[in-house]
Amino acid sequence: MFQQRMRYAFLLFAALLLALPVSFGATASNLKPTTATVRVLAPASVGGKPLNPGTYQVIADSSTVTFKQHGKAVAAAPVEWKDESRKAESTSLVADNNAITEIHFEGKTRYAVVKE
């Protein structure tokens, strides 16, 4: 009887160990940052930091967006992710009074809302 319980407990423990990498892998893939290259055509700002006209690499993770130029981070801000009904046709920035408020990524149904 004791051996039967131990065998059951061992099988249960082994099943949990095997399931752990699968669930961890699914979580890790959700943390993969979304990146894009954008051209800012007019002076703008994100998170209160000014962006001069030019080309930037945008990197958005689960909570932050960072704008890089020539490999250096020039601006960052917290973001909140929202869902759209269809995929964005291109990467685009939405601004209000020259402050970037949304970032839509080509081919994605989720977009980042900049929280300032």
Image: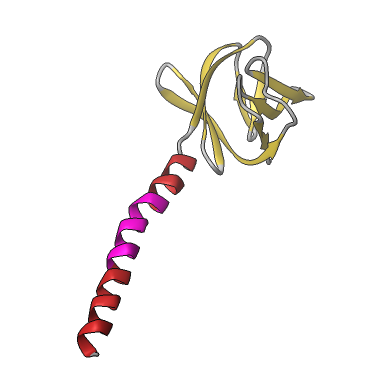
Q: Which residues are magenta?
A: 14-23
At horizontal 68% and vertical 41% (from top left) the residue drawn is: 115
Observer-nearest residue: 39 or 32?
32
Q: Is residue 10 above or below residue 98?
A: below
Number of numbered discs visible in the structure rendering: 0
Q: Is residue 96 above or below residue 62?
A: above
Is 113 displayed left or right of 65 in the figure? right
The picture quadrant where one finds residue 87 is: top right
**Residue 22 placed where, x, y %?**
38, 50
Observer-nearest residue: 93 or 12?
12
The picture quadrant where one finds residue 20 is: bottom left
Observer-nearest residue: 32 or 103?
32
Question: Which secondary structure is most common in the magenta stretch?
Answer: helix
Residue found farthest to the left: 3
Is 92 displayed left or right of 36 in the figure? right
**Residue 104 placed where, x, y %?**
66, 25
At horizontal 62% and vertical 18% (from top left) the residue drawn is: 91
Q: Looking at the figure, which quarter contains the C terminus?
A: top right
Q: Is residue 77 magenta?
A: no
Q: Is residue 80 above or below residue 55?
A: below
**Residue 28 placed where, x, y %?**
42, 45
Residue found farthest to the right: 97
At horizontal 44% and vertical 40% (from top left) the residue drawn is: 29
Q: Looking at the figure, which quarter contains the N terminus?
A: bottom left
